[in-house]
């Protein structure tokens, strides 16, 4: 197993969402190409929500050939427990914005199976999918993409949730605290095992959550994104000026 990157944190503040998308896409292309060259294949975990859409489009437009898509295995960090064709389904969004436009083989696309009857069954099946790819080791994605909720959640790990304390499983079912919608999510140990994590946040509404997430004194139960300070890999926060405006010395 190649050496892990040294744990580190980087904050990149850009003028706007399109600049973030372009720069993060270029960085992602280097990471995926290098991992695929080193390992023969690589694994990316995509985020849901709206923020990564611009990044997915930038990858589809500018990185059809700079990323060896035939060697890329695509996973998700979390999923809403809705049918694959539902407008809220995270894999549907990525399929439309990215996967339909690049040559990633269908057998390399590992969706969270929301046709499993219950969120718990979907979580168990997805954990098996991870074992098939990663073996018995802790799944360590070559690149993990995350957004951040206004409450500081990442993936579907919400503040004050007992899910934050789960360490004996890689995938669990959770419930969104505001609308009680069922979710399936990677657990914190898997998020923290990623070799490289990109956290994307834009807009002033995210500024308080970002400031808390990057404050070393923040209690992780209050702001799960703060847990990323324990990542074993390199964490890059891709922010626009609005999301960064409560950071000390933000430009
Ligand atoms: C989801 C995401 C979730 C998202 C944040 C930010 O399924 O919704 O995984 O964690 O990244 O809620 O969402 P926005 O990018 O839409 O603000």
Image: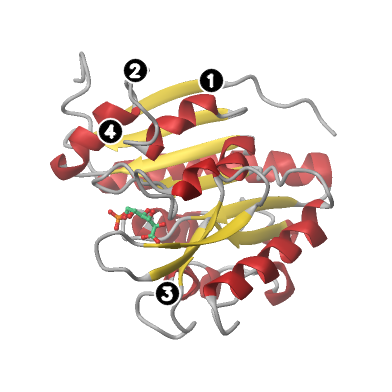
How far, Cα to Cα, is label 1 from label 4?
A: 17 Å
Q: Is residue 57 above or below residue 182?
A: above
Q: In the figure, is residue 59 to the left or right of 241?
A: right
Q: In the figure, is residue 234 to the left or right of 139?
A: left
Question: Does dot 2 land on a helix, a strand or a loop?
Answer: loop
How far, Cα to Cα, is label 4 from label 2?
A: 13 Å
Q: Are marks 3 and 1 in contact (CB under 8 Å)?
A: no
Q: How many residues crowd around disc 4 within 10 Å: few (fewer than 14), some, or many (20 or more)?
A: many
Asked whether 45 or 219 is in front, the reply is: 219
Q: Are marks 2 and 1 in contact (CB under 8 Å)?
A: no
Q: Are marks 2 and 3 in contact (CB under 8 Å)?
A: no
Outermost residue on the front side: it is 162
First in sequence: mark 3 vs mark 1: 1
Residue linked to disc 3: 89
* Residue mark closest to the camera, 2 vs 3: 2
Ligand 1 near label 3 (Cβ, under 8 Å)?
no
* Residue mark closest to the camera, 2 vs 1: 2
First in sequence: mark 4 vs mark 2: 4
Q: How many residues crowd around disc 1 within 10 Å: few (fewer than 14), some, or many (20 or more)?
A: some
Q: Are marks 4 and 2 in contact (CB under 8 Å)?
A: no
Asked whether 37 or 205 is in front, the reply is: 205
First in sequence: mark 2 vs mark 3: 3
Question: Does dot 4 land on a helix, a strand or a loop?
Answer: helix
Residue linked to disc 2: 217
Q: Is residue 71 above or below residue 219?
A: below
Residue linked to disc 1: 8
Q: In the figure, is residue 196 to the left or right of 251?
A: right
Q: Are marks 1 and 4 in contact (CB under 8 Å)?
A: no
**Percent coordinates x, y for residue 33 in the rendering:** 68, 44
Residue at 61%, 52% (x, y): give it. Answer: 44
Which circle marks residue 210 in the picture? Answer: 4
């Amino acid at each position: 197993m190649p050496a892990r990157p040294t744990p580190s944190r980087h904050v990149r503040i850009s003028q706007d969402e399109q600049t973030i998308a372009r720069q993060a896409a270029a960085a992602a292309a280097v990471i995926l190409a290098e991992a695929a060259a080193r390992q023969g294949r690589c694994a990316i975990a995509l985020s849901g929500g709206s923020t990564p859409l611009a990044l997915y489009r930038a990858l589809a437009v500018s990185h059809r050939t700079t990323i060896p898509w035939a060697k890329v295995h695509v996973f998700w960090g979390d999923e809403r427990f809705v049918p694959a064709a539902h407008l809220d389904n995270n894999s549907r969004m990525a399929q439309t914005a990215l996967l339909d436009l690049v040559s990633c083989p269908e057998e390399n696309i590992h969706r969270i199976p929301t046709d499993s009857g219950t969120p718990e069954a979907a979580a168990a099946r997805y954990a098996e999918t991870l074992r098939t790819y990663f073996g018995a080791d802790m799944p360590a994605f070559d690149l993990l993409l995350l957004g951040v909720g206004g409450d500081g959640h990442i993936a579907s790990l919400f503040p004050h949730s007992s899910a934050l304390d789960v360490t004996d499983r890689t995938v669990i079912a959770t419930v969104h605290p505001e609308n009680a919608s069922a979710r399936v999510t990677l657990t914190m140990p898997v998020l923290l095992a990623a070799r490289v994590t990109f956290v994307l946040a834009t807009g002033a509404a995210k500024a308080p959550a970002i400031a808390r997430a990057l404050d070393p004194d923040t209690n992780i139960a209050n702001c799960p994104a703060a847990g990323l300070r324990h990542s074993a890999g390199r964490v890059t926060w891709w922010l626009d000026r609005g999301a960064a405006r409560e950071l000390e010395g933000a430009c």
